[in-house]
Image (spheres, rainbow, N blue to C red):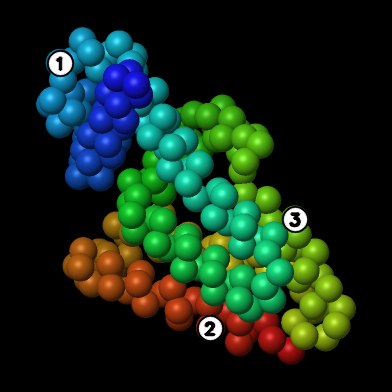
């Protein structure tokens, strides 16, 4: 029990520091200080910053994936699933703002880890959602398009602002608080815009 408590204390401290300074700007000593433990104890649980970041990521990933799978596999209609997906994903990233940058970094420098978490048995599985989209297209309720292209469009609209956050803030002269408000608005705006664009 003590080991589990200490490990969670470390993960919570890491999340706090990563959110403030990002992966590159964080030092292990800062995480140890935040967790109120010595650096030797921190290294006992996690040998290096990369290993710790991966543990933090997997913990967050294991919270998001079940939420998305419940949405994809539910009996809800396509439009309601779109609304639930955009709201759930944006809420999740607003609570874990360090993740998009980390994923992009890992895609470039550590693709093995990306393959590892995407092969996880609990990863998001949109198969049933894609089948449902195909059925709605055949029924004439959604404009004709490849279902995977439709899902790609939805993912792009939802994910890109977080991946390109710094660029968007500079380009559009947006403050941190304004960006936060815009992302809250997008939970509804994306869904309704997207639903209108695909409805036949």
Lateral position of residue 146 relative to residue 102, left or right: right
Q: 77 or 172: which is nearer to us? A: 77
Q: 181 or 171: which is nearer to us? A: 181
Q: Earlier in the sequence, mark 3 or mark 2?
A: 3
Q: Earlier in the sequence, mark 1 or mark 3?
A: 1
Q: Could you tell me how far apart the alpha carbons at marks 1 and 2 are, in whole angstroms?
A: 50 Å
Q: Residue furthest right?
A: 138
- Residue at x 77% of width, y 85% of height: 141
Q: 11 or 183: which is nearer to us? A: 11
Q: 105 or 60: which is nearer to us? A: 60
| Quarter the C terminus occupies | bottom right
Q: Earlier in the sequence, mark 1 or mark 2?
A: 1
Disc 1 element: loop
- The residue pinned by badge 3 equals 127
Provide residue 149's location: percent of width, then percent of height.
Answer: 70, 65
Q: What crowding class fits label 3: few (fewer than 14 Cα within 10 Å), some (14-19), or many (20 or more)? A: few
Disc 2 element: helix
- The residue pinned by badge 1 equals 38
Provide residue 138's location: percent of width, then percent of height.
Answer: 87, 78
- Residue at x 48% of width, y 63% of height: 88
| Quarter the N terminus occupies | top left
Q: Could you tell me how far apart the alpha carbons at marks 1 and 3 are, in whole angstroms?
A: 46 Å
* Relative vertical location of residue 9 with respect to residue 136 in this rendering, above or below: above
Where, by quadrant of the figure, is residue 187 drawn? bottom left
- The residue pinned by badge 2 equals 192
Q: Is residue 4 visible?
A: yes
């Amino acid at each position: 029990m003590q080991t589990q408590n200490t490990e969670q204390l470390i993960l919570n401290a890491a999340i706090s520091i990563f959110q403030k300074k990002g992966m590159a700007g964080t030092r292990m000593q800062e995480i140890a200080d935040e967790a109120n433990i010595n650096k030797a104890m921190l290294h006992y649980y996690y040998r290096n910053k990369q290993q710790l970041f991966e543990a933090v990521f997997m913990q967050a990933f294991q919270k998001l994936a079940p939420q998305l799978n419940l949405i994809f596999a539910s009996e809800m209609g396509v439009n309601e699933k779109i609304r639930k997906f955009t709201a759930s994903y944006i809420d999740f990233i607003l609570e874990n703002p360090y993740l998009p940058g980390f994923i992009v970094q890992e895609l470039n420098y550590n693709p093995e880890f990306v393959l590892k978490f995407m092969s996880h048995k609990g990863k998001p599985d949109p198969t049933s959602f894609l089948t449902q989209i195909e059925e709605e297209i055949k029924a004439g309720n959604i404009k004709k398009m490849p279902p995977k292209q439709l899902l790609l469009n939805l993912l792009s609209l939802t994910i890109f602002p977080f991946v390109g956050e710094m660029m968007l803030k500079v380009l559009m002269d947006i403050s941190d608080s304004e960006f936060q408000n815009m992302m809250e608005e997008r939970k509804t705006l994306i869904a309704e815009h997207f639903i209108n664009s695909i409805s036949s």
